[in-house]
């Protein structure tokens, strides 16, 4: 098995790669090392992986077709996990073209290369943001997701549509993972829990949107990695009971599947902040603000189908996960 991981210097990419490398799996990692957030953090993540002899790193962009074609021709990955994407909801409002180039053009390049190189299984990052304006909780993969409220969400929904087309036309097994608010050590500085921790430690106010009336299905990074690892060998098969008159959006007559991967236990934002305060040992200075464009009030993952397929069950509590993150933060930033 040779696994290509795009966005390997990212938060999920580095943690997943570490796990696979320890299992003696060859990992070919690519990343464009953009400066969306502190590039030193990405460089330090990569250093963790470069210690392993079964890790190959190439700097490049999935939006560059020639680079992707050459990579597939040379290394011939058997499995691909596409985590490269322009992330962030609010950033998409001011920088839409970055999302089109990476999340649509780049993903199409990956699909085309998987098709022409007979890749056994493509797993790709979708997002809980695809649920958009939906109000029914918990969010289920059998729900329609036709009303995105951010460009980021629209590109992720588009990834699922593109993947289905390739599964249908070329029999390419594809699995989409709708991640729910991933957090933990080596995380992204643009995420709320990261900036909350930083500002509380520095005595600066933290911005609490929608006046704190938010809920998130915070999912610890180790649980996310466990879910992905369990799916690598479980390439989707056509659903022989697929009803074309009443189609299930999460499966297909083609080798296509979409899963939620979350903690299955939403937490109130204010409770989350109190947990950070507890582990930092300092009270936050709260600045309450209205809801921001593109945000949703609550997320809550129904993971029944993932549990049934893999036995996956998240095991990390918010208290344990935040404790580990704060411990890492204090060590990394001294």
Image (cartoon, rainbow, N blue to C red):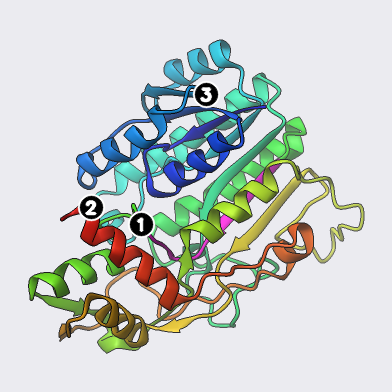
> Where is residue 300 shown, x and y percent of the image?
54, 77
Q: Residue at x 82, y 66 (%)?
A: 246
Magenta stretch encompasses residue 108: no
Mark earlier in primary sequence (3, 2): 3
State whether residue 325 appears in this view.
Answer: yes
Of 291 and 314, which appears nearest the observer?
Answer: 314
**How many C-alpha atoms fall within 10 Å of the one at disc 2: few (<14), some, or many (≥20)?**
few
* Front in this rendered view, residue 308 or 136: 308
- For residue 125, side relative to residue 199 (left or right): right
- Image mark count: 3
Magenta residues: mostly which secondary structure?
A: strand
* Residue 184 shown in magenta: yes
Labels 1 & 2 near each other (Cβ < 8 A): yes
Tell me which segment is drawn in magenta: 174-185
Residue 80: image quadrant is top right
Q: Find the distance from the CA under tag 1 to the CA under tag 2.
A: 9 Å
In the image, 30 versus 62, the foreground residue is 30
Q: Are marks 3 and 2 in contact (CB under 8 Å)?
A: no
From the viewer's perspective, tell me whether residue 314 is left or right of residue 217.
right
For the point 25% across and 44% down, the residue is 41
Mark 1, secondary structure of its residue:
loop
Between discs 1 and 3, the one toward the N terminus? 3
Q: Which mark is residue 332?
A: 2
Which residue does the numbered mark 1 point to in the structure image? 185
Classed neighbour count for the residue bearing mark 1: other residues with Cα under 10 Å, few (<14), some (14–19), many (≥20): many
Residue denoted by label 3: 54
Q: Position of residue 94 (x, y in %)?
A: 22, 54
Label 1 and label 3: CA atoms lie apart by: 23 Å
- Residue 54, above or below 291: above
């Amino acid at each position: 098995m040779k696994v290509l991981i795009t966005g390997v210097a990212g938060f999920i990419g580095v943690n997943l790669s570490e796990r696979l490398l320890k299992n003696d799996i060859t990992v070919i990692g690519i990343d464009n090392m953009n400066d969306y957030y502190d590039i030193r953090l990405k460089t330090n993540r990569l250093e963790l992986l470069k210690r392993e002899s079964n890790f190959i790193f190439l700097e490049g962009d999935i939006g560059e077709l020639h680079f992707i074609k050459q990579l597939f021709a040379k290394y011939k990955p058997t499995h691909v996990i596409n985590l490269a994407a322009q992330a962030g909801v609010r950033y998409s409002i001011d920088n839409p073209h970055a999302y089109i180039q990476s999340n649509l053009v780049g993903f199409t390049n990956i699909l085309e290369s998987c098709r022409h190189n007979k890749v056994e299984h493509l797993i790709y990052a979708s997002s809980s943001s695809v649920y958009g304006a939906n109000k029914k909780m918990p969010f289920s993969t059998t729900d329609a997701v036709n009303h995105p409220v951010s460009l980021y969400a629209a590109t992720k929904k588009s990834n699922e549509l593109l993947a289905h087309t390739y599964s249908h036309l070329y029999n390419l097994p594809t699995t989409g993972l709708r991640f729910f608010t991933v957090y933990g050590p080596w995380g992204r500085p643009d995420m709320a829990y990261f900036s909350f921790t930083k500002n509380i430690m520095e005595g600066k106010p933290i911005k609490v949107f929608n006046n704190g009336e938010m809920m998130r299905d915070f999912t610890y990074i180790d649980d996310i990695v466990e879910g992905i690892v369990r799916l690598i060998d479980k390439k989707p098969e056509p659903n022989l009971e697929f009803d074309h008159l009443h189609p299930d959006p999460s499966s297909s007559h083609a080798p296509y599947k979409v899963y939620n991967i979350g903690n299955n236990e939403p937490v109130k934002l204010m409770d989350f902040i109190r947990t950070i305060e507890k582990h930092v040992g300092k009270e936050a200075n709260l600045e309450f603000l209205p809801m921001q464009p593109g945000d949703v009030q609550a997320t809550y993952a129904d993971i029944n189908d993932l549990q049934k397929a893999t036995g996956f069950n998240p095991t990390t509590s918010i208290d344990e996960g935040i404790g580990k993150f704060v411990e890492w933060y204090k060590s990394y930033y001294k």
